[in-house]
Image: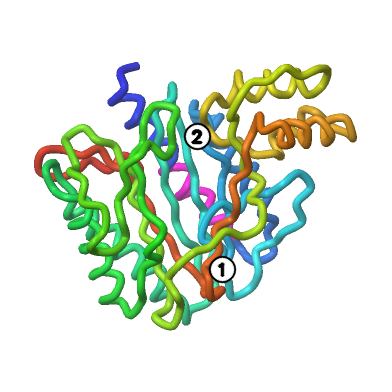
Amino acid sequence: MEPIDALREAGRIAGKVRDTVVKEVKPGVKAVDLCDRVNEMVAELGGAMAFPTNVDIDHVAAHYCSPYGDITVIPDKSLVKLDIGVHVDGWIADTAITACFDPDLRYLVDAATAGLDAAINTIRSGIRAGEVGAAIEQAIKSHGAKPIRNLTGHKLARYVVHAGPSIPNVSGRDNHLIMEGDVYAIEPFAVPLSADGLVMDGPPSNIYRFIKKRSLKGVSKRMLKQIQGEYRTLPFASRWVIRRFKGPEGQAAFQELLKTKCIMSYPQLIERTRAKVAQAEHSVIVTGDGCEVTTA
């Protein structure tokens, strides 16, 4: 499959899974069931996971993925971000949507969506990334909210989710030139005006990535070989690995991979004032006069 076709197919799958599973996000539902549902549907449609599904509740802006045995459930009156990454032959589509269970917070969802729409209508070959950020910020503020200024969209490359250049969600930052053929995930985050509009590192996210091969033995050696072979440079969920290497030996082997820095852990990203966060995200291929949205 040609790269452009793989990008489009990954986007088609990601968009379909997003629109299906978001309807299943409801108070009382287990986060792990939503994560597993995404995995199963992506596989059924012929794709693979580009990163573990995020089910980010309220003030968690990004990077919460259910661990093995997770009992977390969707709370009443919550804002829940469902963030999904799919790849086809390494070519990635990244998309997110927010489910709102508090009518008073609906304006945050509308603000994030407006920011995304503004970015899609602004981005084109030859524009500066900061101009796209300015459009996002203006749209979010017009809905009575503010963007999170230290979270950004990001360039996508084959088997690389964060490939260097970013798309800011505010003006005055990152003025690199966007070029035709570039592939970006654009993801505005909206918070109330009273919030800081900044994220900080929180608890471990249960998301990991392969870093380095080392000389290991036994279960640890087999586990690292499986991680390196299946996930390559892409993030993976601890849950995926522990389900294959069950019991105390599997847990000990996973901890050895962390201790020896064979793998790295991502933190959850928490809004600093614990404000509730809404997110909207699409992946786009930049064209001469605009963009093609692959995840619509």
- Asked if labels 1 and 2 touch by Cβ distance under 8 angstroms, the answer is no
Where in the figure is residue 218, as x and y percent of width and height? 83, 18
Q: Nearer the viewer, residue 16 or 137?
A: 137
Relative to 80, is 265 above or below? Answer: above
Q: Residue at x 60, y 18 (%)?
A: 229
Type of residue at label 1? Asp
- Residue 194 quadrant: bottom left
Query: Gap between marks 2 and 1, in whole Å?
Result: 24 Å
**How far across and down, in percent of the image, does residue 135 sit?**
21, 63
Q: Earlier in the sequence, mark 2 or mark 1?
A: 2
Q: Which residue is mark 1?
A: 58
Q: Residues within 10 Å of mark 2 (few under 14, many from 20)?
A: many
Res 12 visible? no
Color encoding of the figure: rainbow
Q: Label 2, on which residue?
A: 50
Judged from the image, the secondary structure of the residue bearing numbered disc 1 is: loop
Q: Position of residue 70 (x, y in %)?
A: 75, 51
Residue drawn at x 41%, y 57% is 151
Q: In this orientation, does residue 145 appear? A: yes
Q: Is residue 68 above or below residue 263?
A: below
Q: Is 102 placed above or below 169 here?
A: below
Q: From the image, which quarter does the N terminus lie in?
A: top left
Name the amino acid type tagged 2: Ala
Range shown magenta: 15-25
* Residue 23 belongs to magenta span: yes
256 is within the stretch colored magenta:
no
Residue 115 bears which disc, if any?
Answer: none
